[in-house]
Image: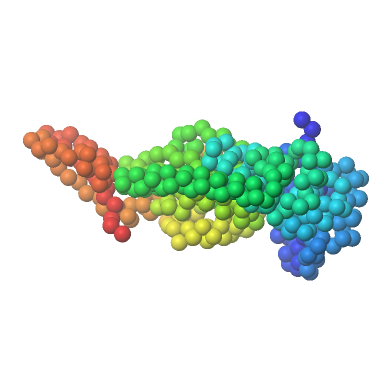
Amino acid sequence: MKRERAIVVGIYRRKEEKSMAEETLRELEELAASAGAEVVGWVLQRRPKFDPGFLLGRGKIQEIAHMAEELQADLVLFDETLSPAQHRNIDQVIPCKVLDRTQLILDIFSQRAISREGKLQVELAQLNYLLPRLIGIGKKMSRLGGGIGTRGPGEKKLEYDRRRIAKRIKRIRTEIEEIRKRREQQRKHRKKTSIPTVALVGYTSAGKTTLFNRLTGENLQVSRALFTTLDPILRRITLPSGLPAILSDTVGFIRKLPVELVTAFRATLEETVEADLLLHVVDFSREDYREEEEAVERTLQELEASAKPLIKVYNKIDLMEDPGRFLERNSLSEDKVYISAKKGWGVDDLLEKIEGKLLVNYEIETVFYPYSEKIPWENLSGESIILERRNEEDGIRVKLARRRPK
């Protein structure tokens, strides 16, 4: 299938913001590749004030229109969220499809959504985005046909009137709320068993799924493409002491994560909010890893999860010079660990740190039951976690972990 040809467009206000703008534009290029496009042109403009009608100004938009014709571009991607007015005005000047960062990310999510929940959340985000932008977009999109920006659950919603869209949004929210309630019941059940939960968070492509596979023995798809994991995946792991835990892998974060997605995926992201411990996975091999760290931290603040116990997991040290020097640092901090999820380096150190963080919430005790007594196994497993059971000459010795009352 022929890949669509794209031009990416960025803007920044001050000179000191240029390097960050270049980085987010490179990220937009990665997003475009994930959606199936080939980037054939770059535009990055410094402008002290955004133009309310054309973002970059009418003259610059006309230049981009000529560029699109010369390069035979199929779409122009803006690294900002365009207002409805900007979208309509730019659409009238540029001869091909015009998409902003939010639309592109929504398009990728529509391709990745597999479960009923994921599809509903993507559709909700698409409809919330499209509702104020209906006037003037539908005819152009339908004339240009399919491709990036017109796929997924929301592709035909432009044909609906506002009333029908509002009704659909209400129905989807009701369904998502029902899913959220079921997930809450599942979490309550897990809490009753006293098993702690650990959530992987991090920038998209930081290696969360690779680490999830390493810790759980799973073989989930690992890809360099962005946003390969949308639906939360939960598996049981066992820590060195025998303490079990539930590990969850959720959607990756990104700079300028659209507010529509944070809102729509709140039911999924509650796995992060409700976890006992967060593992913030960072791609340590990237030059801009600190900026990616900060983007994740901002999203955690939006989710009101920034106060959770957290371990920073600096991944991909196998791509660094002399990775052994980073492994040597693992004994210096309880809140930081250097690993290679791909090679397995430092993973034992990570498991020990996870256990250290979680055991703070538990009391470990050993109880001896003579064979002459009936052992209340059902009550034990409901109130505690059985770490070890050992048969001795006169009875059974049971090692238990009881969650401390909050």
**Quarter occupied by residue 235:** top left
**On the rendered structure, is 151 left or right of 229?**
right
Percent x, y of residue 368:
14, 42
Residue 166 visible here: yes
Q: How is the image coloured?
A: rainbow
Q: Name the residue located 13 percent from the left edge and 40 percent from the top edge.
A: 369
Residue closest to the eye, 4 or 210: 4
- What number of labels is visible? 0
Residue closest to the eye, 385 or 352: 385
Q: Name the residue located 90 percent from the left edge and 55 percent from the top edge.
A: 63
**Quarter occupied by residue 34:** top right
| Quadrant of the drawing holding the C terminus | bottom left
Q: Residue furthest left?
A: 372
Residue closest to the eye, 178 or 79: 178
Indicate whether 213 appears above or below 328: above
Q: Residue furthest front?
A: 163
Percent x, y of residue 5:
81, 41
Q: Name the residue located 15 percent from the left edge and 35 percent from the top edge.
A: 392
Percent x, y of residue 71:
88, 44
Residue 199 visible here: no
Percent x, y of residue 287:
65, 54
Residue closest to the eye, 346 or 292: 292
| Quadrant of the drawing holding the N terminus | top right
**On the rendered structure, is 135 left or right of 325?**
right
Q: Name the residue located 15 percent from the left edge and 38 percent from the top edge.
A: 375
Indicate whether 51 appears above or below 143: below
